[in-house]
Image (cartoon, rainbow, N blue to C red):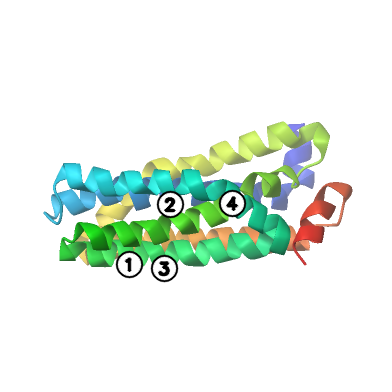
Amino acid sequence: MLRELIIQHKRSSLAVILISACAGVTLYVGNMFWCSYVANQGYFSPSQANVIASLDMGIEFIALPLMAILAYRIGIRKVMAAGLLITAVGAGLNFYLAEQGSVMTSMLTMTVFALGIAIFEAPMFKFLFDFFPARIRCTGIALAWAVGGVFSSVSPVLAQRISDHYGWLGGVLCILLVCTCALLALSIQARLPKTQSTMAIDIASP
């Protein structure tokens, strides 16, 4: 099974790793690191930062099912690509405007960021499901996802190192990098051989 994954499904595995890295890093850097960054900079108190960050989870809870419906109407890849763009813009606004110290402004920018994540992640599991044939699907997704998850654990440290030199750009650059990687994963999926399992995405993603 592992031999088949490595030899026959290298591109699919790479795509899942990139998607996993994007999902994890946007959470760790855009939410958790953001909280510590703005509190350490004195823009917000820790309690204010936590309240603003918790808005992210609330927005995603509401938006995820709605974005999933939208994805099946207009196309999975189109929706995921739009989500990545909005996530990148939201991250930039979220880190840059935090220095104003305005709770309302940061709530608005966090809302944009959370919507971007919801738009990207709503059809994500269907997208991942169609990368591998049924006989190795669970192993393929789980193994590749675990490898991608490694990037999540180191991303706050990397963001902090960059922020030490470039301020608010540290977190933004990390998120821009993984969003670009996720776009590469979308292009990998578009080039995979057409099978019964990928037909659903092609129908919904002209």
Residue located 19% across and 47% down the image: 48
Residue 66 bears which disc, if any?
Answer: 4
Going from N to C along the chain, the mark reached first, 2 or 3, is 2
Residue 26 bears which disc, if any?
Answer: 2
- Spatial distance from mark 2 to mark 4, Cα to Cα? 20 Å
The one of 53 and 148 positioned closer to us in this rendering: 53
Q: Is residue 171 visible?
A: no
Going from N to C along the chain, the mark reached first, 1 or 2, is 2
Task: Determine the image quadrant of residue 183.
Answer: bottom right
Q: Amino acid at mark 4?
A: Leu
Q: Amino acid at mark 3?
A: Val
**Mark 1 or mark 2: which is in front?**
1
**Mark 4 or mark 1: which is in front?**
4
**Mark 2 or mark 3: which is in front?**
3
Going from N to C along the chain, the mark reached first, 4 or 3, is 4
Q: Is residue 30 left or right of residue 100?
A: right
Residue 89 bears which disc, if any?
Answer: 3
Going from N to C along the chain, the mark reached first, 2 or 4, is 2
Looking at the image, residue 172 lies above or below residue 13: below
Task: Determine the image quadrant of residue 138.
Answer: top right
Residue located 35% across and 66% down the image: 92
Check whether the beta carbons of the residues at disc 1 and disc 2 lie within 8 A of each other: no
Density class for disc 3 (Cα within 10 Å; few <14, some 14-19, many ≥20) is some
